[in-house]
Image (cartoon, rainbow, N blue to C red):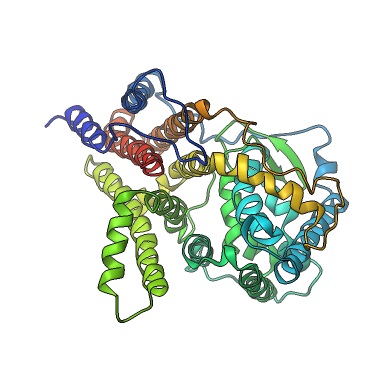
Amino acid sequence: MRPTTRAVAAALAALVLLPASADAHGLVQREALPIPQWLFAWAAAAVLVISFFALAVLWPQPRLEHDRWRPLPGGRLIASAPAQAAFGLIGVFLLVVTIAAGYVGSGTALDNWAPTFILITFWVGLVFLSILFGDVFRAFSPWRAIGRVLPSLERPYPERLGRWPAAAVILVFTWIELVSGWGDHPARLVTAALLYTAGTLIAQYVYGVETWSRRGEGFGVYYNLFSRMSVFETRDGVVGVRPPLAGLPRLDPAAGTVAFVTVMIGTVTFDGLSQGPLWRNLSADIVDALDGTFSALTASQIASTLGLFLGVAIVGGFYRLGIEGARSVGGDLSVERLQAGFAHTLLPIAAVYVAAHYFTFLIFEGQAINYLASDPFGQGWDLFGTVASGIDYSIFPQKDTWYVQVAFVVIGHVAALTLAHDRALTLYGDARLAVRSQYWMLGIMVGFTSLALWLLAQAGT
């Protein structure tokens, strides 16, 4: 088959995954849409195909690989040592309050500051803040703030480790979030936070604060990768601006980077899958098979753990398929070089998976932090006069949820396609060969789009 035919065939094959109807993941049901939802799916795929051919014709030279950054007026003040110290103190204060609330506060989930702050404000809210305003977490990181006032051995960091420790941290954290059930046991959750704090401070002592923050500290790496989509970046103590997405091509290909991005997407994939009937039936079969050997709760956790690893494996295999296809067009590039070279193109996909999947979760349940801030320890306080505020489900129209989620998915995958095309032009050095390599990436992007919409459909079935 001709390369173009293969591309169209791959895209059509991916479209088979699209649901006949898709309900967005959310806390509330949407009103009926004026047109069938499957038309949105086909329209999203059509946008990707049109974007692909537009890039092939109108984008003959790399444009995002060039470093274009300029300082902002007042950018040195924002990134100054006093400002960084103040931000760090705020981060340490929030860590102390969160740990204390987990042990002292009453209630579970949305009735306790600790799980609400950790699993919603911190884990989800910081993703949106990082994309909008840059590496916010680096400024407020309590572990970095503490580490900067402690001594350090500054030993050389093993290159072979790369971002592997950070990938392991995020995988374990998502296990805690999705499998463990510790959100209903605040003391267990903050005990894990204390253990992580101790481990992080030890690693910073050995390898240095900045080195560990860039490589091994899971959350530092996680939010930094999202922040590369922002127009704001701090360099040499100065806050500046750059074109959108321009920070992504500058991602260094450290060991474990592909694994880290795969974990980012794969764990959200499992979260979406776990809310639908397909996984409920499969999980029930696994629990039945383990009956008599483990308790029902343990068997369910084992099944979910297997599902979590399966989600990561599916995404990793999907990406590897696209890389093998790109390698088959020629250019004498190794699989390792292609995998590392295109890893940054998956970050917009990771971002829109989080945005589409957790949008209503943050908008609605995220409001709980307002009333909990007035009484973080459950002592009957009303520090800010918000203790009776509750959650307002009318702040975002139900009927608009699907439109926003589809917009997230389409924009993110078009951005990923653009980044892949731009990097291919650099790697191959030949526009025609670069375009041929991207036939496979088109199929992968359509596939990821299909998967995203199908996962959203699982929440409504």
Question: Could you say where residue 23 lies in the image, as x and y percent from the top left?
Answer: 40, 35
In this rendering, is residue 33 above or below 450?
above
For residue 208, which quarter of the picture?
bottom right
Residue 300 appears in the picture as rendered: yes
Question: Could you say where residue 16 lies in the image, as x and y percent from the top left?
Answer: 22, 35
Question: Could you say where residue 46 lies in the image, as x and y percent from the top left?
Answer: 32, 23
Towards the viewer: 58 or 448: 448
Which of the image's four quarters has the N terminus?
A: top left
Residue 12 relative to residue 345: left or right:
left
In the image, farthest residue toward the bottom: 293
Residue 1 relative to residue 81: left or right:
left
Towards the viewer: 279 or 147: 279
User: Residue at horizontal 68%, vertical 57%?
Assistant: 111
In this rendering, is residue 337 above or below 448?
below
Question: Could you say where residue 134 lies in the image, as x and y percent from the top left?
Answer: 66, 42
Q: How many marks?
A: 0
Residue 334 appears in the picture as rendered: no
Which of the image's four quarters has the C terminus?
A: top left
In this rendering, is residue 225 above or below 214?
above
